[in-house]
Image (cartoon, helix red, strand yellow):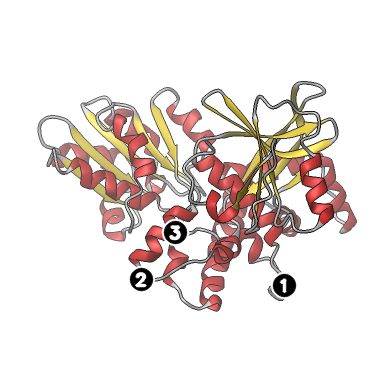
């Protein structure tokens, strides 16, 4: 597995901190691998390390609650600072009590947990002021290139736009096997985890909403528009229920909301937002007859890549012209339009018109899958194949 330095360099400063280091993210994005890579680094300076994987039944047989966990650590740790790694800790009864206790006694604690039971809001509630969290994401394209080279394979941009970046899927060669793996993963993280965790009684309603949202990525939504879709299917659902279901998906790192920023009102519009999938495969496995939504998946990929590179993103309303992203980083702003191609006249006019009347103090960028450079004196065109290899927009 590749060394994910992008994440490790952010965590490294906290190796010796008494804050609980929480490695979060959607299931199967590589959290356990990150944990193991941290452990390998620390083992070069200390042998006082304890690692427990609670997916291992041999571990669970002897440790099932906070008291047993604390007792085990006390018996096996050496003198001095002890580095403790607890993988899939959510299965331990009162895990939060054990974590809060262990951090008090010269221990450096690292934990991961399944998104089905250990979610972002629970960190705040259970470990408030005592933790720092790091969200791990599926592979971006530069990581995919590195990993597929390690496997002796290649991955085209089209393949990325369809099947995304879940690490395990690159071990399979046949499209049918990739689809089967991703479908099973979807059933686990999207359906079973959330329905079981929140004891959702209206399963069909929840599944309808999930399917609608995940195959409609990169689009502007409101809770009301989703309610209208549900009603058209002759199902009844309140706005509050829709908001609750969307929160479940967001807490589990399955979707992410991007609010719309209006130039006219100079504020974020809280009722309208765009939804992006954590991985575009969640759209593609819902497509019929290989009719993949490459246009919206391309925008979703650009979103994931920009977030990975540390940009804060909003949808931007330029007096009625929607700009896909207002990206901000290091006190710089970038207005970004994303389209599959600029080759058609209507697409060209639409994408460039979105920048009308904006000053030139911030860069105006269009990203597309074209091979021709469509840059003008005021708008910079970036080919997707170049953008995916860039570390920043500068």
Residue at screen point 65% across, 58% down:
370
On screen, residue 223 versus residue 138, left or right, reads right
On screen, residue 5 versus residue 384, left or right, reads left
Residue placed under numbered mark 1 in the picture: 288
Where residue 173 appears, x then y in whole percent? 46, 76
Q: Residues within 10 Å of mark 3 (few under 14, many from 20)?
A: many
| In front: label 2 or label 1 | 2
Residue at screen point 70% across, 42% down:
376
| In front: label 1 or label 3 | 3
Work out whether residue 27 can be spotted: no
Residue at screen point 67% across, 45% down:
375
Tell me the element at label 2. loop
Distance between the Cα atoms at labels 2 and 1? 31 Å
On screen, residue 28 versus residue 4, left or right, reads right
Where residue 23 appears, x then y in whole percent? 40, 41
- Of all residues, the one furthest to the left in this rendering is 79
Please report contact status of discs 2 and 1: CB closer than 8 Å, yes or no: no
Where residue 183 appears, x then y in whole percent? 58, 67
Work out whether residue 75 can be spotted: yes
Question: Of the numbered discs in the image, which one, if any, rests on residue 305?
Answer: none
The quadrant in which residue 103 appears is top left
User: What is the number of callouts on the image?
Assistant: 3
Residue placed under numbered mark 2 in the picture: 152
Nearer-N-terminus badge (1/3): 3
Q: Residues within 10 Å of mark 1 (few under 14, many from 20)?
A: few
Q: Is 236 located above or below residue 318 in the figure?
A: below
Tell me the element at label 3. helix
**Depth order, front residue of 302/226:** 302
Where residue 71 appears, x then y in whole percent? 21, 39
Residue placed under numbered mark 3 in the picture: 144
Residue at screen point 32% across, 46% down:
35
Nearer-N-terminus badge (2/1): 2
């Amino acid at each position: 597995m590749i060394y994910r330095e992008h994440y490790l360099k952010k965590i490294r400063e906290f190796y010796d901190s008494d804050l609980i280091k929480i490695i979060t993210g959607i299931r199967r994005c590589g959290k356990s691998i990150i944990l193991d890579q941290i452990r390998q680094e620390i083992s070069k300076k200390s042998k006082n390390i304890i690692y427990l994987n609670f997916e291992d039944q041999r571990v669970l047989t002897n440790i099932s609650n906070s008291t047993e966990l604390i007792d085990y650590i006390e018996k096996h740790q050496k003198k001095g600072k002890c580095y403790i790694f607890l993988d899939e800790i959510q299965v331990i009864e009162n895990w939060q009590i054990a974590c809060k206790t262990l951090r008090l006694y010269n221990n450096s604690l690292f934990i991961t947990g399944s998104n089905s039971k250990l979610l972002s809001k629970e960190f705040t509630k259970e470990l408030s002021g005592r933790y720092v969290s790091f969200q791990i994401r599926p592979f971006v394209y530069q990581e995919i290139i590195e990993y597929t080279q390690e496997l002796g394979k290649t991955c085209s941009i089209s393949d990325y736009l369809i099947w995304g970046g879940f690490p395990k899927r690159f071990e399979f060669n046949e499209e049918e096997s990739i689809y089967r793996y991703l479908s099973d993963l979807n059933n686990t993280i999207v359906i079973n985890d959330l329905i079981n965790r929140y004891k959702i009684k209206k399963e069909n309603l929840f599944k309808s909403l999930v399917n609608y949202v995940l195959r409609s990525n990169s689009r502007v939504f409101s809770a009301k528009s989703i309610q209208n879709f549900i009603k058209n299917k002759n199902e009844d659902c309140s706005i509050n229920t829709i908001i609750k279901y969307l929160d479940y998906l967001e807490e589990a790192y399955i979707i992410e909301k991007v609010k719309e920023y209006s130039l006219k009102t100079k504020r974020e519009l809280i009722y309208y937002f765009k939804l992006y999938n954590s991985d575009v495969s969640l759209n593609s496995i819902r497509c019929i007859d290989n009719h993949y939504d490459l246009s919206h998946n391309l925008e979703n990929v650009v979103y994931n890549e920009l977030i990975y590179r540390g940009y804060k993103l909003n949808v931007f309303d330029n007096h009625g012209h929607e700009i896909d992203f207002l990206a901000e980083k290091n006190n710089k702003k970038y207005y970004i339009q994303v389209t599959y191609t600029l080759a058609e006249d209507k697409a060209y006019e639409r994408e460039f018109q979105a920048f009308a009347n904006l000053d030139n103090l911030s860069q105006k960028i269009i990203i597309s899958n074209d091979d021709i450079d469509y840059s003008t004196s005021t708008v910079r065109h970036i080919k997707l194949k170049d953008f995916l290899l860039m570390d920043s927009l500068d």
